[in-house]
Image (cartoon, helix red, strand yellow):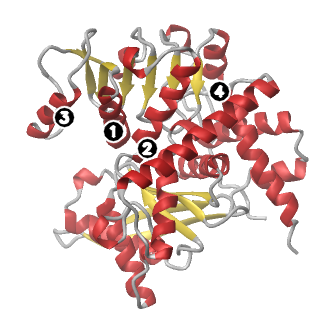
Amino acid sequence: MVASPTLASPSPAHICPYAQACSYLDWAARELKLDPGVLAMLSTPRKVVTVAIPVRLDNQQIQVLAGHRVQHCDILGPYKGGIRYHPAVTLEEVSALAMLMTWKCALMGIPYGGAKGGIPIDPRRYSVPELERITRRYTSELIKDIGPAIDIPAPDMGTSAREMAWMMDTYSMNVGHAVPGVVTGKPLSIGGSRGRELATGRGVMITVREALALRGGSLAEATVLIQGFGNVGGAAASLLHQAGAKILAVSRGSGGIYNPNGLDIPALKVYMNERGGNMASFPEAEPISNAELLLQKADVLIPAALENQITEANADKIQVQIVAEAANGPTTLAADRILESRGITVLPDILTNAGGVVVSYLEWVQGLSYVFWDEERVNQEMEGLMVRAFSRVVQEAANRRVPLRLAAYTLGVGRVAQALQDRGLYP
């Protein structure tokens, strides 16, 4: 068994993402009464890879970066997970996200295991040629660890279809033929799937819609707060606005804007495109910090930024009926219990933000078969999987009399544990 990565111990000042991920696993394991040996295997990544990435910058200087890829579990199928370019990338964060991806794929009923990768850089500080050299060298270093039947990367924070095209081309040049199935989230011109760009945000919208319906409400009557206005938060905002929801506040890393009467999301996107992504001074809106946004009164709060945004320090001040986790791990376990005690429904990340991996799976299927679908079919297939998963989680929560998060984990972890038992231990 591969040893777990060396990770920092959690403290009040630093909530270790990997320790938190293991806490959720332990929680589910107790409910499922898992064998300690099975729990130990599920707590340990199958492979942890850190590579050196020497890159020649435009000024001809050489910089050596560190690139990580953690492959958590492949009991159900090849590894699947994003590649993140962000200064805060650490081995512990990548390890936690890889584990969450395992449970997410199992919960959604798709034949993948969890993985995650990343490079601790701010991509805005590098030129496009530099980013291409970084991505191609990173791919080359991982060439034996990825592949359409081994590990299929995808975009994540700080990466996009562009980086996936570079990864696909680098892999294809090394094996001598085009391999569209090696990554997902690619441009349409080289085998990408229609509907992929909005997939995670669409999944968030669907999950919120289903949760509101359980309470006798609808999107047309809902007020929503969204922390994070990137690919996921921005897509969710647009789709919720189209469905009639009133978006009261949105934010980016530097802060956000608020209007108690609702923001005009299409106009905001035009405004930001004209100002290089800046939303400050948007008409008929007042500035608001990311911390303040979380505490405003609304029906739904969607944390779509970074992890550990809702903690013991602010959970008792949240003023919504539903928290829909579009980000990975935005709520700590202690905060989750506070929200539960206050009657606030938390839609867990491994369900709420699963739309992206679902459409990645659909893209992979299309790439392997070389038969590509229109956007309507992709959206229908994804919605069917999301709605069925939501229904299973609600039913599991009712049967076990547990919160939705624990129900989602018992379904995901339980499926992987059952597959592990059925396959047996080699040798």
> As shown in the figure, which amino acid type bears the numbered disc 2?
Thr
Question: CA separation, marks 4 and 2?
Answer: 23 Å
The residue pinned by badge 1 equals: 235
Amino acid type, mark 1: Ala
Q: Residues within 10 Å of mark 1 (few under 14, many from 20)?
A: many
Q: Which mark is residue 333?
A: 4
Whichever of callouts 2 and 1 sits on the residue coming sooner in the sequence is 2
> Which residue is rendered at x = 33% and y = 38% of the image?
235
What whole-number distance in Å separates the C-alpha atoms at marks 1 and 3?
A: 11 Å
Residue mark closest to the camera, 4 vs 1? 1
- Please give the count of numbered marks on the rendered protein: 4
Residue located at (71% from left, 38% from top): 409
Distance, label 4 to label 3, CA atoms, is 34 Å
Give the SS element for disc 2: helix
- Which of the two labelled residues, at mark 4 and mark 1, occupies the earlier sequence position? 1
SS at badge 1: helix
Q: Is residue 122 above or below residue 132?
A: above
Q: Residues within 10 Å of mark 2 (few under 14, many from 20)?
A: many
Who comes first in sequence, dot 2 or dot 3? 2
- Label 4: which secondary element: helix
Q: CA distance from mark 2 to mark 1?
A: 8 Å
**Depicted 258 relative to depicted 331: above or below:** above
Tell which circle, 1 or 3, labels the residue nearer the N-terminal end: 1
Toward the viewer: 382 or 78?
A: 382
